Each structure stands twice: as C-alpha cells, then as structure tokens.
C-alpha cells in the first residue's frame, strides 16, 4: 500500500514493519495485562458484578428505559431543530442585508455557547416561570438546550448544502422565470436536502452524546443517569460504565455507518448534481464552508 | 446593575475554564498527533489500534468519560493523580485527563484529514526527481499538510473550549458550575445567563476569527 507518506514497502521495509508490529504488540499486550490485573486487584472481574447484565431485570428496569429517554430527547431535539435550522439557514442566504445579519448573529451566538449553559439556563427558566412539573422539567430543559444549539448548527449545514449546489441551478431557475421563493422551494432545497442527509445523520450522533449532559447535571433519567441508579443497586460501578459505554458506542457507530453509507450512495447515484456534504465537510472542517469561521465553529464535536 | 456579581468569582471561574482548555489542548495535541502517526503508519497493527481508539472514544459521550474518571478511576481504582488529599486539584487533573482522551480522537482525525489533502502525486513527483524520504517529508508533504490542518485544528480547539463545561459534572469550579450556582441563588437569571454567554463568546470568537483567517491565508490553493 502506497500513500503520500511512504512507498509500497520493499523487502527491507517489510522486515522493519514486522519488527515494529512485534514491538507494538508486546507493548499493547503489557497494557492490556496491566488493565486486567488492576481490575482483578479491585475485584471488578468477579462474576457477581457482571451477572445482572445477563438477566432481564437490569435491562428492563434500568438500562432500556434510560436508553428510551436518551432516544426520546434526541429525536425530539432533532425534529424541532430541523425546521428551525432550515429557517435560519435560508435566512442567512437572504438578499436583504438586515435579514442576513440578524439570522447570522443569532446563529453565531447560539453556536458559540456551550450546550450545557443553554440547558442549565432553560432549566432555571422553567423552574421560575412555567407550570412544568418537576418530573417533566429535565426533559424540557434538555430538549430546549439541544434545540437552540443544534438548530444553529443545522442552519450552517443547510446553508452549506445550498451553497454547495452549482450556480447553474439558480441561474436556470431564474431563466425559466421562477421567483426567489419558488427557486428555493422547488429547485434548491430538494437538492440540498439530499446533499445534507449524511451531515444531518452525523449531527444526530452529537445530539445523542449531548443528552448525557442532562443526565449528569439536571437529573434527566437517560442512560447515564440510569447507570447510576443501577450501580447503586448492584454496586457495580465499573461494569455498569463499560456496559453503558458499549451501548453508546454501538448506537453511535450504527448512526455513523448509516451516514457514511448514505454519503457513498448519494455520491454514486446518477440523479441530482452529485453534491454531497460528507462528514468531513461539516464535522472536521467547517472552514470548507464559505464564511463560516466565527466563534461558533466546532459545532459538531 | 451588576451587583448580582458580588460575592462570586466569575473571573476565577473563567480562568479555570481557560486553564482546562489550555492544558487539555496541549495534551490532546500530543496524544492526537501520536494517534494520527499510528493511523497513517505502514504498520498494520498500529493502524488498527489508532482506528479502534478513535472509533471507540469519539462515540462515547464526553460526559460519560469525565464522570468515569471521577467515579471509576478515582473512587474505585484509587487513581489520585498525584494529589491524594487535594480534591480540587484531583478533580481538575481528572477532568484534563478525560478531555485529553476524548479530544485526542478528534485531533487525530483533523490531522489525518490534513495529511490526506496532500495528493499522492506530490510525493510521487518528489520521488521521481530523486528526493530522499526525509526530504520528501520535510520539503513537500509536511509543509502542505500543516497548512491545511490549521482550520480543522482551530475547529477542535473551539469545541474543546466549550466542552470544558462538562467538567462541571465532577465538580470542577469552572464557568458552567458557577453559573448553575448563581442562577439558582440570584434573581437575575437573564443577566447571569448573558454574562456567561458573553464570556464564552469572548473566549471562542478571537480563536475562530484569527485561526480561521490564518487557515484561509495559508491554505494551499489547488
């Protein structure tokens, strides 16, 4: 395998690679052995601590309801944030300067604030000036925080999606006499939505991860919070952390894989303009999006 | 008008945020670069380890990692981080550890994507004119890779600044924790929210603008 950094290995390089592999393998094995020993020393490997996860009670009473709450908050946040994000994204592309400026300020402001601050603030606001019951309040606060933050991130995704379309699309639409609104709704948006799909699915991963903040800081009964209740009953802190982490990894890995499958599929398809906003454009390098480098960059980690 | 600020160390809390950011940025830059080096190395086992680390760690919520450093590493395994009696320092170091472990996976991806923007043809052309391996790296590949990596890394730095608020979950006295305390005890919810929001805008806006400008200026035009 040749890359920009090294050539296809010859006989000498191959021998060297085998040597490096062996040394690295030994180091890795030592590390694993050390972790195993430490766990054993603290009696974290006893079967009694792990047994609850093989029985249905731990799952039906704690983990699954927690996971359901995580998914509920994430889904609600996404469903509410999408139209809001689309609105602000399109407003940032308006021909009127004051609309552009207002939308831009709102988006950049909410993107530059940590989502935890938004959640804490929303929670306090609901405590003081609303009749939401204290059981419901954490969910409301978490969803509000996530919506405010992610709507502004999605606004950037929508804007990037529309900007990524070839200019000929707008010009052709104008040439056949469509108005600005018509151009947006019947020509640009449908194509941009397809291009944005992978990026939107990737953003869902960020939302799922951020729900855990509500569990730690606001007492929202999602997966991380359910873990705490579970560990209090079975006294298995480490095993419960490992199981919960695996649940998150599997869930997010499925979402990420779905996103990259979508991306590949859209890139291959002959329909449309072949423009796709991949994970890399939005997650790794927002600078690739025109004029997108305010305080709000880094929205997707 | 700002008398609600009295009795609270707002600047101290933001200083803690800055310290968390700076130390975690340094740590994750080192660990992330190592991971990236592994991920692009010709040794399959190292590539596998790098890929596995990145895919596992970035799919776990940062909150889970940070809470684990406190409840798991400190309480169960007795990792005191060199400060067995000083719980404040211990929480701070654990938070940095968690932030470094998490952020490094994003630093790794940013650096890798930067290296990947250098076309293979550049190295092939360099080999064709007879440059040695170190010359290729020094004169052709790394200069281009560094320039295209500034944007993505600035992005990670801004995200890290915001992510330090998660340290509030294990009681590190940084901005988010102070804001939680203040809005629960004081009447001016909106004003307090505005002060802290502004604080984060002040922290992240210059980073974004300066590094964004730099990355555009230094970008390799292709």
Image (spheres, rainbow, N blue to C red):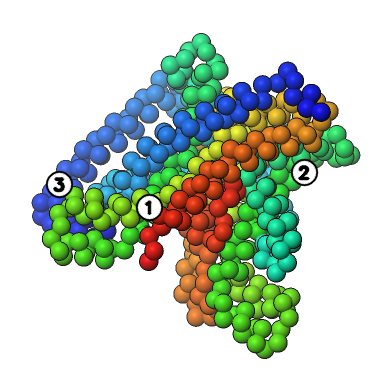
Q: Is residue A185 left or right of residue A262?
A: right
| Callout in the foreground (2, 1) | 1
Asked if one can make out residue A161 in the rendered structure from this viewpoint, the answer is yes
Q: Residue furthest top?
A: B85
Give the residue pinned by disc 2. Answer: A140
Is B83 rendered above or below residue A62? Answer: above
Q: Quadrant of residue B178?
A: top right
Residue B65 in picture, x, y percent from top left? 52, 34
Q: Quadrant of residue B140?
A: bottom left
The 10 Å Cα crowd at callout 1, few under 14, some 14 to 19, many 20 or more, is: some
Q: Is residue B177 left or right of residue B167?
A: right
Residue B6 in picture, x, y percent from top left? 75, 20
Q: Disc number at residue A16?
A: 3
Residue A82 in picture, x, y percent from top left? 69, 59
The 10 Å Cα crowd at callout 2, few under 14, some 14 to 19, many 20 or more, is: many
Q: Residue at x 38, y 49 (%)?
A: B111
Q: CA distance from mark 2 to mark 1?
A: 43 Å
Is A248 rendered above or below residue B114? Answer: above
Q: Tell me the quadrant of the picture where the N terminus of chain A can be found.
A: bottom left
SS at mark 2 in the image: helix
Pick the front one: A37 or B195: B195
| Tally of numbered discs | 3
Pick the front one: A75 or A282: A282
Q: Disc number at residue B147?
A: 1
The 10 Å Cα crowd at callout 3, few under 14, some 14 to 19, many 20 or more, is: some
Circles 3 and 2 in contact, beta carbons < 8 Å = no
Pick the front one: A128 or A292: A292
Q: Residue furthest bottom?
A: A176
Q: Residue at x 59, y 24 (%)?
A: B172
């Amino acid at each position: 395998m040749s890359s920009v950094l090294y050539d296809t290995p010859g006989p000498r390089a191959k021998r060297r690679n085998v040597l490096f592999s062996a040394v690295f393998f030994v180091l890795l094995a030592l590390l694993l052995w050390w972790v195993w020993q430490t766990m054993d020393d603290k009696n974290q490997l006893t079967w009694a601590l792990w047994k609850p996860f093989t029985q249905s009670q731990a799952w039906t009473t704690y983990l699954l309801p927690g996971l359901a709450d995580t998914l509920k908050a994430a889904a609600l946040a996404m469903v509410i944030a999408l139209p809001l994000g689309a609105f602000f994204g399109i407003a940032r592309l308006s021909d009127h300067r004051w609309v552009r400026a207002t939308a831009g300020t709102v988006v950049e402001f909410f993107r530059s604030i940590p989502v935890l601050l938004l959640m804490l603030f929303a929670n306090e606001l609901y405590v003081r000036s609303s009749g939401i019951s204290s059981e419901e309040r954490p969910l409301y606060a978490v969803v509000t925080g996530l919506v405010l933050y992610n709507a502004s991130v999605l606004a950037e995704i929508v804007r990037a999606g529309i900007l990524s379309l070839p200019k000929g699309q707008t010009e052709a639409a104008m040439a056949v006499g469509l108005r600005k609104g018509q151009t947006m709704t019947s020509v640009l948006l449908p194509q941009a939505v397809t291009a944005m799909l992978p990026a939107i699915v990737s953003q869902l991963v960020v939302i799922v991860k951020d729900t855990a903040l509500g569990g730690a800081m606001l007492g929202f009964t999602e997966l991380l919070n359910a873990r705490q209740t579970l560990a209090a009953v079975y006294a298995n802190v480490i095993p419960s952390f490992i199981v919960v982490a695996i649940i998150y990894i599997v869930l997010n890995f499925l979402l990420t894989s779905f996103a990259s499958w979508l991306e590949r599929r859209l890139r291959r398809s002959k329909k449309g303009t072949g423009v796709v906003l991949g994970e890399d454009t939005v997650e790794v390098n927002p600078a690739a999006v025109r004029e997108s480098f305010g305080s709000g960059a880094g929205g997707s980690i | 008008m700002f008398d609600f600020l009295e009795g609270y160390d707002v600047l101290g809390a933001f200083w803690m945020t800055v310290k968390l950011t700076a130390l975690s940025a340094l740590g994750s830059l080192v660990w992330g670069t190592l991971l990236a080096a592994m991920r692009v190395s010709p040794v399959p086992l190292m590539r596998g380890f790098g890929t596995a680390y990145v895919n596992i760690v970035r799919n776990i919520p940062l909150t889970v990692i940070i809470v684990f450093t406190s409840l798991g590493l400190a309480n169960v395994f007795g990792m005191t981080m060199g400060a067995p009696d000083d719980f404040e320092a211990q929480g701070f170091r654990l938070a940095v550890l968690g932030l470094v472990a998490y952020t490094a996976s994003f630093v790794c991806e940013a650096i890798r994507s930067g290296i990947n923007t250098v076309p293979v043809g550049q190295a092939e052309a360099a080999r064709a004119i007879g440059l040695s391996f170190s010359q290729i790296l020094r004169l052709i590949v790394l200069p281009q890779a560094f320039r295209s990596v500034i944007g993505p890394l600035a992005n990670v730095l801004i995200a890290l600044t915001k992510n330090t608020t998660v340290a509030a979950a294990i009681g590190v006295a940084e901005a988010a924790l102070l804001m939680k305390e203040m809005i629960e005890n004081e009447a001016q919810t909106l004003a307090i929210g505005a002060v802290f929001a502004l604080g984060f805008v002040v922290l992240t806006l210059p980073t974004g603008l300066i590094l964004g400008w730099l990355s555009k200026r230094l970008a390799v035009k292709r």
